[in-house]
Amino acid sequence: MRIGTARQSYATDEALLDTRTQWAWMAALGVALVAYPFVASPYWLYLACLVAIHVASATGLNLLTGYTGLVSLGQAAFMGLGAYTVAVLELRAGTPALLNLATAGFVAMAGGVVVGIPSLRVKGLYLAIATIAASFIAHFLFANWTSVTGGTAGLSVPPARVFGVTLETSFRIYWLVVPITVLMVAGAANLFRTRIGRAFIAIRDRDISAEVLGIPLLRYKLLSFALSSFYAGVAGGMWAYFFRVVTPESFPLIMSIFFLAAIIVGGMGTILGGILGAAFMTMVPELLKLLVGWLPLGGNAAVILSPVRTIVFGALIVGFLVFEPHGLAEIWRRVRRFFHLYPFRT
């Protein structure tokens, strides 16, 4: 029997869901995810798949930047590695989609380990610059390794096939993208119940103290880069199956900035923050399209939208850093506390 909020065992203390209310909400979310593709229009199915892909990649970046404290602007490059891996395997080997996605994750993981090697010596702005350099190197390879990547023309990706079913529509690809994203998010949440996750947090809070306590910095920093890149690689592979074409211009530097903005807006160092931030930042361009569509701009709407999107991203980052540094996740926690204490609120 529980008294108040006390936990009676280590198992209950570490449980991700420890109340009936949380289990009920999680069950409701599961039902909603299953029912969604049957009631949503093709446009909203497209957005749901895109949000799921972005959530997977943002969760990976949150492992690295939010939990380990290592700033990276190379997430788009790792997604590109995953996307090209899937494209090459589909075109030349014809291997199963799930195996291709796993391989894409491991290829991106290898790239992340290489990029993460300087993290023992540099951090902060200097590490961010190192990851930007890695992005430019990856873009150069994508554009010039013509025999593998197809050069600037890129590669066309056949539709994914899972258990003999061809996933050529948004309705069908939804059943590949969303379950994989859910598993990845659940895995990230459980990671911080382990020694590895606690080591990441210790390195973020004070790396010198963590090393004094016996945490090998290089090993865990490389592991953080590897996990983050694995998530990006799988997300890139899902991106390739979703859009069915991969080019060097598919993964620009601004996409890396997009994911960094997502975890800042959502709340760094929280799994919920990566989810909320990715969903919010994915919907911002769609809202901008609606707003621009209402204005009498004629054919100039697309030309105006591109710089406006960049300005909005920058304004959101600055705004959340100034007014709500803990992001949307903290706003959600405050809302929960408000209703939890209602009507006995202060």
Image: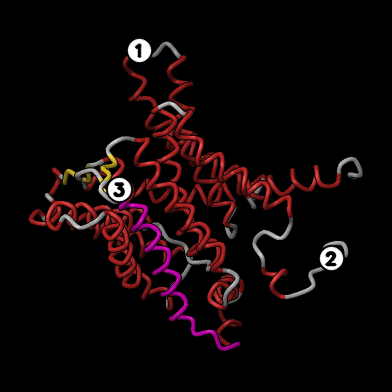
Please report whichever mark, 3 or 1, sits nearer to the chain's N-terminal start: 3
The image's mark for residue 164 is none
In this rendering, the count of numbered labels is 3
In which quadrant of the rendered view does residue 306 lie? top left
Name the residue at 46% across, 22% down.
290
Q: Quadrant of the C terminus?
A: top right
Q: Amino acid at mark 3?
A: Phe
Residue under label 2: 2
Marks 2 and 3, how far apart in space?
50 Å
Q: Amino acid at mark 2?
A: Arg
Name the residue at 15% across, 53% down.
149
Residue under label 3: 251
Q: Which residues are magenta?
A: 213-237
Residue under label 1: 298
In which quadrant of the rendered view does residue 242 lie? top left
Q: Give the vertical position of 314 relative to 81 (above or below).
A: above
**What is the crowding at mark 2: few (fewer than 14 residues within 10 Å), some, or many (at least 20)?**
few
**What is the crowding at mark 1: few (fewer than 14 residues within 10 Å), some, or many (at least 20)?**
few
Name the residue at 27% across, 52% down.
83
Q: Residue furthest left?
A: 147
Q: SS class of the residue under badge 1?
A: helix
